[in-house]
Amino acid sequence: MVDASPIIEISRVSKTFQLQQQTIQALSDANLSIAKGEFVCLIGASGCGKSTLLRIMAGFEQPSSGQALMWGKPITGPDPSRGMVFQDYALFPWLTVRENIGFGPAARGLARSQVRETVDKFVELVGLTKFADVYPHQLSGGMKQRVAIARVLANDAELVLMDEPFGALDAMTRERLQDELLEIWQRTKLTVVFVTHAIEEAIFLANRVVVMTPGPGRIESDNALDLARPRDVASPEFNAVRRALGAKLHSHHGRKAA
């Protein structure tokens, strides 16, 4: 059940970057509220500010103006309660699967027995018990991404921020991980914000799909999805939603080119 109180509140957030002599505006007056337990996908054209918005939620970037809040308090920097999963996995190559997943709990000062218990729990959750003592270079791309997800969860994250995490994977692996991510989300009651270019992926995964305009990024529309789970990508209902969201995205491309 989704809690009504917002875990994340983005209020009139703008972000500019200096690139040599040029000022780039990545976000302009973005507003977004996310309730605990929701699965929200951000979609939009390349350069629309999706990743910048995600990094502000993570605390890696600060807004140029406006506010980013978690539980009503300003996000001032990275925190274990907000975990980030990247497309390129970002695992420590010199650590085993078990050691990668246990890195955060150990760094927080948990007792060795608690770290071991936490690691065992999340290794099992992502189906990697047989691979717990191997190194990242011995894993497939899909397995590496499972380790990255488990590492965030083991660090006691309430909010998982995912920046095109399946973008580099083949289609079959991507579909399998989408199913596994949904199962983890439903079992753990986490809050997930997921950036993707793929409309179909967003509709398959999310409670809400947030469409962003081309840069400078604004929230163009916030679309609650009333589709039963598990979702069938071939169903008329699914494809009606895909057409509607596709029309919103493509209308921006047309306006920008005009």
Image: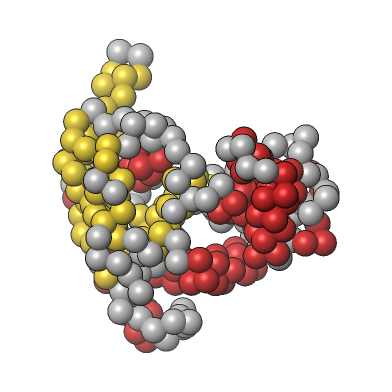
- The x and y percentages for residue 49 are 33, 41
Q: Nearer the viewer, residue 40 or 43?
A: 40
Q: Is residue 164 left or right of residue 42?
A: right
Q: Is residue 148 visible?
A: no
Q: Is residue 157 left or right of residue 227?
A: right
> Picture quarter containing residue 227?
bottom left
Q: Nearer the viewer, residue 95 or 215?
A: 95
Q: Is residue 106 visible?
A: yes
- The x and y percentages for residue 53 are 33, 42
- The x and y percentages for residue 5 are 25, 60
Q: Nearer the viewer, residue 213 or 13?
A: 13
- The x and y percentages for residue 70 are 31, 46
Residue closest to the far bottom: 236
Q: Residue at x 70, y 56 (%)?
A: 117
Q: In the image, is residue 37 above or below residue 158?
A: below
Q: In the image, is residue 41 above or below residue 100?
A: below
Q: Residue at x 44, y 82 (%)?
A: 229
Quadrant where the image shows the N terminus: bottom left
Q: In the image, is residue 229 above or below residue 48?
A: below
Q: Residue at x 70, y 64 (%)?
A: 124
Q: Residue at x 35, y 42 (%)?
A: 57
| Total residue callouts | 0
